[in-house]
Amino acid sequence: MSRTDDLFALCGNSRPRDPKGRNARLHFFGTLPFDDGTRLNQKDGSRFSTHAPSAYEQPQPYDLSAPCPTVVALVSVNGGVGRSTLVTALSSGLQRLGESVVALDLDPQNALRQHFGVDPELLGVGRASLLDTRWETLLQAGFAGCQVIPFGNTGIQQKDNLQGWLTREPKWLAQRLSTLGLSERQIMLIDTPAGDNVYLHQALSVADCVLVVVQPNAACLGTLDQLDAVLAGYLERERPPQRLYVINQLDERSAFSLDMVDAFKLRLGDRPLEVVHREPSISEALAFATDPLDNLAASVACDDINDLCRLLIARKKAR
């Protein structure tokens, strides 16, 4: 039995977990925002106590036939695989190739604002939605001319209110995007939380392309069945989203990682699979909130990012 067969046997007989996944997420996202049981007053910005669903949770009319951007949702079952990092790099890469990009953070951990250096105190989609604030007021400048919409800091009660609302209103995200006034020429990249959750389903409901982000390890390989089950209903739509799998942060010096790439290829069959190599300067960019592509000239990772950007552009044109 080959090492690849061993990997499949392992993943078929158990539900492995990456023991470092939680620690990696905590290191990447930082501490969770403190919740004091209050939210902002819409009129004057003061804070007042709330332990009930927001009064602003009212559906608004929207036109689904209006022009809309190509939506790419970056998803994964496993945490710590580098979704937010990849959203940041792709936003810059697509913008440099002449595209107009908006990066949307749908993860309550609010990590994307760290990558782009967005002020943590600025209002984001979490509280803005509960306060009935229009999303176009949330747009922030990103790298290379792209724009960013952060999730923003939210407390525990605010998260509960929003998740309850999103569960009851499956077209919440479609409605909000329709009010942004984005054109068909634009691309929206959506950063989603790890796992099966209401934010993921909202993103999948509007996605034209689903970018499944994994790392070359047994934990990610072992959860592909779970992700397939989540995606199944969306792939039955009249216009199903395209799927693209990305092995992120590949270190070719590791024989085991290369074996894992072979295992993923066998598992995915003819489904498209791309690779982004590990590059320390991308991680360093997060520490300084700088453009991760600024220092990637003539690197393998830069070629990987650009190849992935061109692939997304080609799929946008074929939409």
Image (spheres, rainbow, N blue to C red):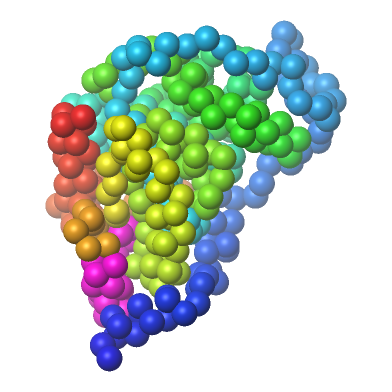
Q: Is residue 168 above or below residue 31?
A: above
In the figure, is residue 15 to the left or right of 181? right
Which quadrant of the rendered structure holds the C terminus? top left
Range drawn in magenta = 247-267
Q: Is residue 274 above or below residue 157?
A: below
Q: Residue at x 61, y 21 (%)?
A: 128
Q: In front here: 249 or 156? A: 156
Q: In front here: 130 or 205? A: 205
Question: Dominant secondary structure of the magenta stretch?
Answer: helix
Q: In front here: 35 or 264? A: 264
Q: Looking at the image, can residue 53 be seen?
A: yes
Q: Residue at x 31, y 14 (%)?
A: 67
- Residue 291 rendering spot, x and y as whole percentages: 34, 39
Q: Residue at x 39, y 40 (%)?
A: 234
Q: Is residue 132 above or below residue 310?
A: above
Q: Residue at x 36, y 53 (%)?
A: 213
